[in-house]
Image (spheres, rainbow, N blue to C red):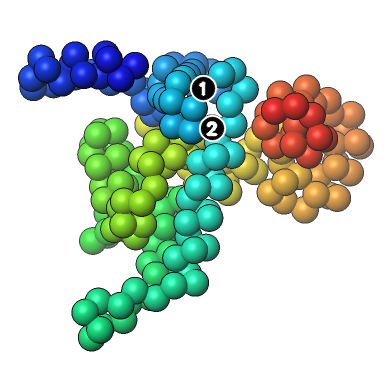
Amino acid sequence: TEESAEKIRQLNLDEVKIRSPLTCKVNGGLCSYCYGWDLSKRKLPEVGFPAGIIAGQSIGERGTQLTMRTFHKGGIKEESITEELPLVESCFENRFKFKKEKLQDLLNQGLDKFYERFMQIMHAVYKKQIDDRHFEVILRTMLQYPGKIMGITKVGKEQRSFLATAAFRDAIKVLKEAAWEGKEDNFQGVKEKMMLGLAV
């Protein structure tokens, strides 16, 4: 609550341990305490809150807005955001290299080191106009295997649900294979529920 946050501020502590989407221990989801406040309602989100959908929409929509605008700096230099957006894609697809250092190399040095560098890139591109936790929600999915980072497309392709897989690959082929092999889907994921029009 705001009252709790104010009490912590008044204590003038050097360090405070906080929860975040990256540290949440819940399997197959994200708890409201680690996600934090739903700023639109000024309270913790309820069960079923579409954190992943909101994260993807927030990042994607801002990228779309930025591609339609050119920044003018002092009327002298023009800088197009379209030159920087491929950098974001390379990070989300785990193809980014910085001075020959890959994201996996940074992760091997520790989650803090990895997160710091990743967010430096996001802040540079998006000018700190997106809530950090939206990136954390996406990163949580990319880091679902301890000590290993996967690109978001690869994460989607490795889904156990054949419906979720169909969202990332040749849908007809995936569905044919699932029918031929007699696969079953419990429709627990967000993608499957959205595809079937079920409550998320």
Residue 13, quarter of picture: top left
The residue at the point 15 percent across, 21 percent down is 9
Residue type at numbered disc 2: Ala
Q: CA distance from mark 1 to mark 2?
A: 9 Å
On residue 91, the disc is none
Question: Residue drawn 67% across and 32% down?
Answer: 190
Q: Vertical placement of 185 versus 162: above or below?
A: above
Task: Return the residue at label 2.
Answer: 51
- Dots 1, 2 in contact, CB < 8 A: yes
In the figure, 81 relative to 191: above or below?
below
Residue 173 location in percent, x, y? 84, 49
Viewer can see residue 139:
no
Q: In this orientation, which residue lies closer to the viewer: 44 or 35?
A: 44
- The residue labelled by disc 1 is 45
Q: Quadrant of the C terminus?
A: top right
17 on left or right of 94: left
Q: Is residue 18 left or right of residue 86?
A: left
84 is higher (above) or lower (below) than 184: below
Are there few (<14), some (14-19), or many (20+) residues within 10 Å of tag 2? many
- Residue 52 locus on image (x, y percent): 55, 36
Q: Position of residue 115 (x, y in %)?
A: 29, 40
Seen as rendered, the residue at the extreme bottom is 76
Report which quarter residue 160 is drawn in: top right
Residue drawn at the location 48% of the way across and 50% of the way down? 59
Element at label 2: helix
Q: Nearer the viewer, residue 160 or 132?
A: 132
